[in-house]
Image (spheres, rainbow, N blue to C red):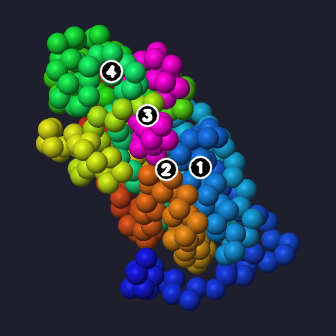
Amino acid sequence: MQRRTLLHYGLAGIAPLGSAAQAGALPLRLIVPYAVGGPVDQTARILAAQVQPWLGPVQVENRAGAGGNWGANAVAKAVPDGLTLGIAATATHAINPWLYRHMPYDAAQDFAAITQILRVPNVLVMHAARARQLRIEHLDDFLAYARSHPDKLRYGSGGNGSAGHLAGVVFQQQAGLSALHVPYRGALPAQLALLADEVDFNIDNLAAAASNIRAGQLRALAVTSTQASPHLPGVPPLAQRFKGFTMDSWWGLVAPAGTPPARIAQLHRAFVQALQTPATRAQFAALWAEPQPSTPAQFEAFMAQERARYQPVVQASGIQL
């Protein structure tokens, strides 16, 4: 990161944050609203390790369930003393407010933004063997097959109303095709189902699919960002074919609303510094992901923008839980 960027975040020459790292202080608790092993959990644990020089020990706690609502609600209801943090993600803070009839928390009011962690495109992937069997090598092949075989292809997702499901709904609408949706209990089971040939394609986030694409188990056909991914040369963005199509995955750090502003600033400085360490960048790179720090105000505005963007998408899908 260039020096002017470090200065922008107020990090040049940052010293360890003493009050939280002193002997006897309670450790930070970082709540991940998803199961162990997925990319959100992996990046949370990378950060928890890298931020220790500034904040001391960080305990990662996984609270999966209800599309992330259980974990997000635990953060919202925690004491706002700066010792409980959580991961805010596309589902918990942009999709679920419109998807669930009764929400246990208010995504717009119950959290204090700290920083975005990353933003990665979703990727349309097929099981490589299945793609070879159907003679699908590129996006054009996929579209031609799907349009000529309505409801023949099945796609998996992490559940009804998940980001992968909604991306599939919008993709079908814009591409003029029809496929059968198969919901699973989370993104990892959906990917395992794709690898087991239970479904034909998924729209999964790139960080989750990266290792299996590298290994040749999955074939990437398109990404959902506006630009092509540097990690997937020759794989086009869907926006090239379907104007305005963009459905990336993102997550970041939040605290309960009411956490003192001075503590938010302290946490922001420490986590942005941790995001920029060589070890963090190297481990994120293995997931084909780039750290994307922001100011608290920027992350709060981004989440509000994403909520507004997903409202008509969820409503058009007709799904409500």
Q: Residues within 10 Å of mark 3 (few under 14, many from 20)?
A: few
Residues shaded magenta? 191-216
CB contact under 8 Å: marks 4 and 2: no
Dot 4: element: helix
Q: Along the polypeptide, which appears first: circle 3 or circle 1?
A: 1
Question: Which amino acid lies under the numbered mark 4 shown in the image of this protein?
Answer: Arg
State the mark number for residue 42. Answer: 1
Position of 140 with respect to 56 (left or right) is left
Based on the picture, tell me whether residue 210 belongs to the magenta stretch: yes
Labels 3, 1: front one: 3
Q: Nearer the viewer, residue 128 or 240?
A: 128
Residue at numbered disc 3: 216
Q: Along the polypeptide, which appears first: circle 3 or circle 2?
A: 3
Residue at image coords 33%, 21% = 132
Residue at image coords 56%, 89% = 13
- Residue 110: image location, x then y, percent: 52, 54
